[in-house]
Image (cartoon, rainbow, N blue to C red):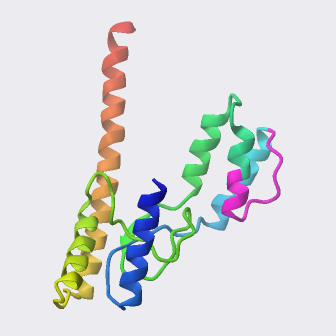
Amino acid sequence: EEFMLAANQAVATLLNDLELKFLRRIHPDPSQRKLTNLTKFAREIGIKTEPITSRFQIQQVIKQAIGKPYEQAVCLTVLRSLQKAVYGCEEDRHYALNFTNYCHFTSPIRRYPDLTIHRLINAIIAKKPPVQDLTQLTQLGDHCSDREQNAERAERELKKLKLLNYLHPRQ
């Protein structure tokens, strides 16, 4: 996984250095309100923490929860405190990884944004001018982000349905 992250970061840095437009994986910083709520939750269950303002403090909260009965609740609350990652062309960092340049290039499930990066790299290798339509790329990033969120919702609904089917005969 570390090699995949390094490759994703290296490719994004290369494309950025070449001043090319490409789909980045953007993970915005959490809102102050959500971090305040996370701090309150952590303190209410007995985790000692200063007001949470950084990724490092979030990691400390998670470490304190490991092996405790509330570990899963803490992990879920942390996840809910974070913003959703999206695909976009803007030069913005990936909060969770703390990378300035990051794209999906090596995703093991082959997302479409990966393929757009592969096409750019292939154009560079072939010494051909890469497609650089900012409007189209922005729309594609929005579309891919929407599809990803729809897939997550469908997965959650399927899990609920499977659970209900499993529980039905046990009433």
Judge from the rendering whether residue 146 lies leftward or rightward of residue 6; answer left or right. Answer: left
Instruction: Return the residue nearer the eye: 128 or 44.
Output: 128
Q: Main secondary structure of the magenta part?
A: loop
The residue depicted at 33 percent of the width and 75 percent of the height is 23
Q: Is residue 120 magenta?
A: no
> Relative to the observer, which residue lies in front, 148 or 64?
64
Furthest toward the top, the residue is 170
Quick check: 56 left or right of 79? right
Q: Residue at x 72, y 48 (%)?
A: 61
* Rendering coords of residue 120 (x, y %): 24, 79
Q: Measured along the vertical axis of the image, is residue 167 above or below residue 6?
A: above
Choose top left, top right, bottom left or bottom right for residue 159.
top left
Residue 122 position, x and y percent, is 20, 77
Residue beneath the point at 61% across and 50% down: 78
Front residue (pair 87, 165): 87
Please determine whether, in this image, residue 58 is positioned above or below residue 46: below
Q: Is residue 48 magenta?
A: yes
**Residue shown at 25%/56% (left/top)?**
110
User: Does residue 77 sit above or below 162 in this rendering?
Assistant: below
Tell me where residue 26 appears, x and y as whole percent. 45, 70
- Quarter of the image for residue 154 reads top left
Q: Which residues are magenta?
A: 46-59
Q: Quadrant of the C terminus?
A: top left
Percent across and percent down for residue 152 are 35, 48
Total numbered labels placed on residues in the image: 0
